[in-house]
Image (tube, helix red, strand yellow):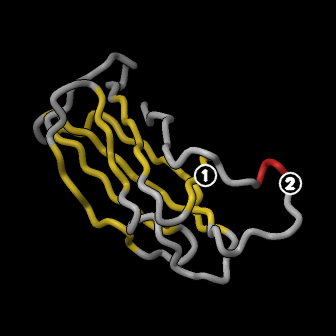
Amino acid sequence: MSNVNERCQSTLTCTFRDKDGVLATPTTLKYRIDDILSGTVIKPNTSVSPSTSSYDITITASENSIINTSRIYEERKVSCEWYASTTLIGSADYLYRVINKHKIPLEYSPSASPSVSPSISPSPSV
């Protein structure tokens, strides 16, 4: 799971594949972003028309804001579905953490430390 500092823009690169694992260029990508614990919709269902077999979703700094400031981090889920016309050809979920920079504990394990880069790079694929 990637970490992103709160109030930092990040990018999720989606690479689209069909059910056989072959690269595909969908006519429509639908995605949404949700906070996992609270169920808060961070970004409602959004549709775009990719022109290649990959697409960069920009997650804005405001979308990476902490909802509950008493938490050290919040987990977010980006849910993606891609279509050829009206036929669903793939879907994937991507989880990441938004790190509360003002609530970092004095003692923490290296695996819980925030990432130095606000960018998300793994690509969801089927």
Q: Residue at x 36, y 29 (%)?
A: 15
Horizontally, residue 61 falls left or right of residue 73, namely: left
**The quarter of the displayed image where residue 69 is located:** bottom right
Secondary structure under tag 1 reads strand
Q: Position of residue 35 (x, y in %)?
A: 49, 69
Picture disc at residue 52: none
On the image, the x and y values in percent for residue 75 come to 58, 63
The x and y percentages for residue 56 are 32, 39
Mark 1 vs mark 2: which is more N-terminal?
1
What amino acid type should be assigned to the residue bearing mark 2? Ser
The residue at the point 27 percent across, 25 percent down is: 53
Q: Is residue 92 above or below residue 100?
A: above
Q: Quadrant of residue 4?
A: bottom right
| Classed neighbour count for the residue bearing mark 1: other residues with Cα under 10 Å, few (<14), some (14–19), many (≥20) | many
What residue is shown at x 85% (from left), y 60% (from top)? 108
Q: Residue furthest right?
A: 107
**Element under disc 2:** loop
The three-letter amino acid code for the residue at tag 1 is Asn
In this view, the residue farthest toward the left is: 85
Mark 2 packing: few (<14 Cα in 10 Å), some, or many (20+)? few
Q: Please indicate whether residue 105 sits to the left or right of residue 75 in the image.
A: right
Q: Mark 1 and 2 residues: CB-CB less than 8 Å, in contact?
A: no
Answer above or below: position of 56 versus 118. Answer: above
The residue sitting at 15% across, 29% down in the picture is: 51
Q: CA distance from mark 1 to mark 2?
A: 14 Å
- Residue wearing tag 2: 109
For the C terminus, the image quarter is top left
Residue 118 x/y as whole percent: 52, 49
Work out whether 57 lies above or below 71: above
- Mark 1 = which residue? 3
Q: Nearer the viewer, residue 88 or 39?
A: 39
What is the total number of numbered labels drawn onto the structure image? 2
